[in-house]
Image (cartoon, rainbow, N blue to C red):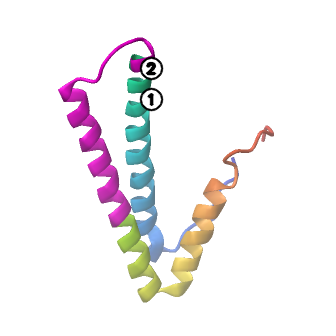
């Protein structure tokens, strides 16, 4: 993976919100995958699993809103930091889907 360029201080809270959003997405998808495996093996979702799935989705939705608000605020307050954040995210995601070894 490519080493990321440093972010300006003004963009750090939005970057942390982005990372938190990814963490909640991963938690939600991981739980969905576990449930899918259970279903393939003939299992059924329990009420507790349904509640957990709802909680994970709500946590992710909340983090998406936090990130979206942080990016909008950054765009209003510091366009250069906003641009740096978007480039940082692009750079961080540039290796996704790559099949070559680095």
- Disc 1 is placed on an element classified as helix
Kindly identify which residue carries mark 2.
37
**In percent of the image, x 39 and y 65: which residue is there?**
67
On screen, 13 above or below 40? below
Pointer 1 with pointer 2, Cβ within 8 A:
yes
On screen, 17 above or below 83? above
Percent of width and height locating residue 38: 39, 18
Is residue 64 on the magenta stretch?
A: yes
Is residue 12 on the magenta stretch?
A: no
Q: Quick check: 5 left or right of 24? A: right
Q: Which mark is residue 9?
A: none
Q: Quick check: 101 left or right of 57? A: right
Q: Quadrant of residue 91?
A: bottom right
On screen, 20 above or below 15? above
Front residue (pair 63, 19) = 63
Q: Which mark is residue 33?
A: 1
Q: Quick check: 48 left or right of 72? A: left
**10 Å crowding of disc 2: few (<14), some (14-19), many (20+):** few
For the record, the magenta segment spans: 39-65
Q: Main secondary structure of the magenta part?
A: helix
**10 Å crowding of disc 1: few (<14), some (14-19), many (20+):** few
């Amino acid at each position: 993976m490519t080493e990321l360029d440093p972010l300006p201080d003004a963009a750090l809270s939005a970057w942390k919100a982005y990372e938190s959003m990814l963490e909640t997405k991963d938690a939600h998808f991981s739980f969905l995958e576990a449930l899918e495996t259970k279903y393939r093996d003939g299992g059924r979702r329990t009420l507790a699993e349904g509640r957990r799935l709802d909680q994970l989705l709500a946590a992710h939705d909340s983090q998406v809103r936090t990130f979206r608000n942080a990016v909008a605020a950054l765009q209003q307050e510091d366009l250069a930091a906003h641009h740096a954040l978007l480039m940082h995210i692009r750079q961080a995601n540039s290796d996704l889907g790559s099949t070559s070894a680095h």
